[in-house]
Image (cartoon, grey):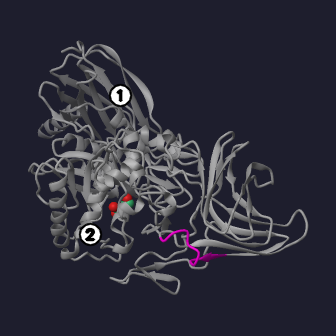
Amino acid sequence: MFVLFIITLTFLTTTAYAAEPLTVTVDAASPGRSLSDDFYGIFFEEINHAGDGGLYAELIQNRSFEDARIPEGMTLDGNEVVGPNKGWRFKFDTTNQTPAWKLIPIEATATMSLDNTNSLNANNPTSLKICVDGLANNNIATVILENEGYHGVPVQADQEYRLTLWAKSDEITSLGAVIPKQEGTILAEGKITGITNEWKKFELTLKANETYTQGRLCLSIRNKGTLWLDDVSLFPVQTWKGRPNGLRPDLAEKLAELKPGFLRFPGGCIVEGCTLANAWRPTTTLGATESRPSRWILWNYRSTQGLGLHEYLQMSEDLGAAAMLVVNCGMACDFRDGGNVPLNELTPWIEEALNAIEYAIGATDTPYGKLRAEAGHPDPFPLKYVEIGNENWDDAAYRPRYQAFLTAMKAKYPQLLYISNIEIGGDESEIRDDHYYTDAKKMRQMEHRYDSEPRTGRTVYIGEYAVNQDNGNGMLRGALAEAAFLLGLERNADLVKMASFAPLFYNVNYSKWPINLIGFDNARNYAIPSYYVEKMLNDHRGDTVLTTTLANVPRSDGLDELTALAHFDSRSGEYILRVVNFADAPCEVNVEINGANIAAQDAWGVVLTSDRDTDENSIDQPNNVVPKEIRISVPGSSFKMTVEKFSLTVLRLKKENPAQ
Ligand code: AHR
């Protein structure tokens, strides 16, 4: 009898439990937490050829012949370079002095070499010297200097390309310029004449008659003599928003589609440098491109700095995003060679940062504000945030440097918001930057990371996050884990003010980092599922985050299989529900929106899902995992919805009377 009672009780309990529906209850009667307008932003760093060979529209690789130079501040030891502080060392290729360039003598004898005795200017010390010693006496004899671009020089039919170069020679007065197709057809051609024995800039517009992605730029010489060349550039006339020295349109559009609240630049570790001598220095990136020094960056290549402070600020403005400038705080990357500026020698580093800020927002009668005006932008740029250092986590070294920078900057620019790398415990104008790179499970667990953090006035920015372990090349599984993490950040919107995935870009032919938001080659691009998560959450967000409670959520592997959060958008008068389902099965959810009259409607929304949570996109298959629109019939404030397996769903719900 007793056994029967236990069995019956167990049966009833199990049945009752199993029958309990998964319920999401939204408290629409209480005020909720306001979500910062800048919440979803982007993090740009020159890594994986994100800029040179990517977003920066230059088509010529190694345009100023500086790429073989060894990193600033390091010394060559055999086939490695070594840092001065900790002896940090890595391989450095010294076998090719002219990467991306090839000299092809046809029925001719000629050589090319680097020359530091005929410099274009002090910032661009290396030029290319070509000696043509012999040419057969026929119509074929030619010397061709060829640049391969970044895995091909791509051209589009009917588009114009501006070839500019600096040249000097006593004997060679003209150069042919051709973009050939591999089989020998000519896609575009022109001629440069009037070369003299003084450095002079030449410009030529080439118009392509066909679309071809594997082109080359070929400069041809048809007489004997010695020729020096420098700063050979091929730039599409059509850049994003028509900006000079501007951006590749398709990649910039990909960013614009995210509608980022802020643009963080220029990183990342490149701000710190492997050692201080190669740390990013904003004012060296200003002015005419041929006068900007190139700089080796710790992602193992030399950057042209063509994408410099002005271009980043212009990009922020064109994206409608607040600019977030990251400055070196007198500390190099401690993980690499490191090195800190002594505290009593910080002044030039602080001035460098102040000058960069002055360039962005200073009055036009200040030295750097004047430079900005002369560069065609008298109005201030939308600089709002300055981060002092990047990932400088050595508390004892960082704290006094942060304070020195902060004091100087706040005195001059109290209107800006300042970001620190570690917990400082500052006031409301200060923000702490936290970074997370982990696997999907840990990212999901971090949904509640900020729930119990004490509120002190100072706020938090998640400057870098990504599921980049056990996540292939960017799987749906990682993106859904990030979605849960982001809902956790939104839930803590009183504390967490901003977030950005990192890194942003990678050229599929030059990748250095495991998982990046947007991949591209020289003509195409694609986004990983994480991009669509960010886009969906940003496109469909309100200005208030509502208290949302879940009941009867199934668990597996110690984790909830579903999470959800609701917003209210006072601008459109809509409630917006975001739901993540990690399970390999659709899930029926009861939704109760308490304290609001939801109209009966065919609610529309967007869902990101796929057959397997391991599914990915790629450059050849960019649309495997992309959002699709959905309609769900909603009778009112209380309704049932079926959430697809492995999915993020956002659903927009109109109020019965939007005026209320
Ligand atoms: O996003 C790539 C790198 O990760 C960043 O440069 C650095 O800040 C972090 O360690």
Q: Quadrant of the C terminus?
A: top left
- Vertical placement of residue 511 versus 105, above or below: above
State yes or no: residue 114 in magenta.
yes
* Picture quadrant of residue 307: bottom left
Can the viewer see residue 153? Answer: yes
How many numbered markers are drawn?
2
Where does the magenta region start and end? Answer: 113-122
Q: Amino acid at mark 1?
A: Thr
Give the residue drawn at x 32%, y 71%: 333
Residue that extends furthest to the bottom in the rendered view of this protein? 78
- Vertical placement of residue 137 versus 552, above or below: below
- Residue at the disc numbered 2: 348
Q: Which of 187 and 635 lies nearest the eye of the viewer? A: 187
Residue 319 got which mark? none
Q: Quadrant of the N terminus?
A: top left
**Quarter of the picture for ligand 1?**
bottom left
Residue that extends furthest to the right in the rendered view of this protein? 138
SS for callout 2: helix
Give the residue drawn at x 73%, y 60%: 175
State yes or no: residue 70 in magenta.
no
Q: Main secondary structure of the magenta part?
A: loop
Some atom of ligand 1 lies within 8 Å of the CB belonging to the residue at label 2:
no
Q: Give whichever of discs 2 and 1 has the lower sequence position.
A: 2
Q: Give residue 436's position: percent from left, percent from top.
A: 30, 57
Q: Amino acid at mark 2?
A: Pro
Cα–Cα gap, marks 2 and 1: 60 Å
Can the viewer see residue 441? Answer: no
- Residue at the disc numbered 1: 642
Give the residue drawn at x 18%, y 43%: 492
Q: Which of 289 and 22 lies nearest the eye of the viewer? A: 289
SS for callout 1: strand
